[in-house]
DNA sequence: AACGATGCATCGTATATCTATGCATCGCAC
DNA sequence: GTGCGATGCATAGATATACGATGCATCGTT
């Protein structure tokens, strides 16, 4: 990430789920999309994203499907599930709570 | 912390510096104060705080002074320095930038 | 006198992210 | 048509940060 990477921790899964809630995407596409919608601030690396996607898949928040003709380039599309949307809602609420509390402390 | 601890990463030093910018404090006091001003949400642990204080001291963002009569309980008071205030200002700006970008992504 | 709160500090562990790397395909410039 | 950068998936190792556990000492209250 361009910003202090430590700040990102704990927010990455929320960001990824948010993008997937709009449309199915494959890994590389998620990285590019995130960079665009964050005005170039969030440059997520593959080594960060794929473990997250695999974990989300493991917990059934997303499902993956290989797409592509035989012998052509294969892409793994990820789609959010009903559980995933519930998780996202909870994570958004958590983020809002955290953010407002930090602001309260910083403003005194 | 009560909130997802991963969210805290990268913000802890900023929170500590913010408190120290108001008045000198010793470690235990910082933990209690932070808990109060965050409405009980941020329960920082000793294992978290002391390494942060030592790192801030190392980088000369704070200076420490032992206070207490001979034979009585000693307290180590931490005071923010000029460099510390500059660091805090930068960290606040970084937080604001990060926060607004996350919100932009979450809101689409 | 005992016990919980205060007060400082470190160690081992878990987790998250990054860098580096590997491999394959696609598109474009030369 | 060949090479090279971009695309696309994935893992391994290194690093950073926070936590839980622990240790030790003092203070206040019962």
Image (spheres, coloured by chain):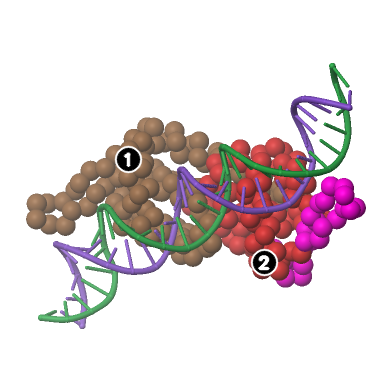
Chain colours: A red, B brown, C green, D purple
Residue B27 position within the rendered picture, expressed as x and y whole percent measured from the top left = 31, 53
- Give residue B57's mark: 1
Q: Which residues are magenta?
A: A64-89
Q: Is residue A106 visible?
A: no
* D29 relative to B46, above or below: below
Asked whether the viewer can see residue A65, the reply is yes
The image shows residue A100 at horizontal and vertical percentages of 57, 55
Q: Residue B11 in the image: state x and y as whole percent.
A: 49, 49
A108 sits left or right of C28 in the view: left
Q: Residues within 10 Å of mark 2 (few under 14, many from 20)?
A: few
Q: Residue at x 50, y 59 (%)?
A: B5
Q: Nearer the viewer, mark 2 or mark 1?
A: 2
Q: Disc 2 marks which residue?
A: A58
Q: Nearer the viewer, residue B57 or D10?
A: D10
Circle 1 — which element?
Answer: helix
Q: Chain of mark 2?
A: A
Residue depicted at x 67% and y 66%: A58
Residue located 32% across and 45% down the image: B54
């Amino acid at each position: 990430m361009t910003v202090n990477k430590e700040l990102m921790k704990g927010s990455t899964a929320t960001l990824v789920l948010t993008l997937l809630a709009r449309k199915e995407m494959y890994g590389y596409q998620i990285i590019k999309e995130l960079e665009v919608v964050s005005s170039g601030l969030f440059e997520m690396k593959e080594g960060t994203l794929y473990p997250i996607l695999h974990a989300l898949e493991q917990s059934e928040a997303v499902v993956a499907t290989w797409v592509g003709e035989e012998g052509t380039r294969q892409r793994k599309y990820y789609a959010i599930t009903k559980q995933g949307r519930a998780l996202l809602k909870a994570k958004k609420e958590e983020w809002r709570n955290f953010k407002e509390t930090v602001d309260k402390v910083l403003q005194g």
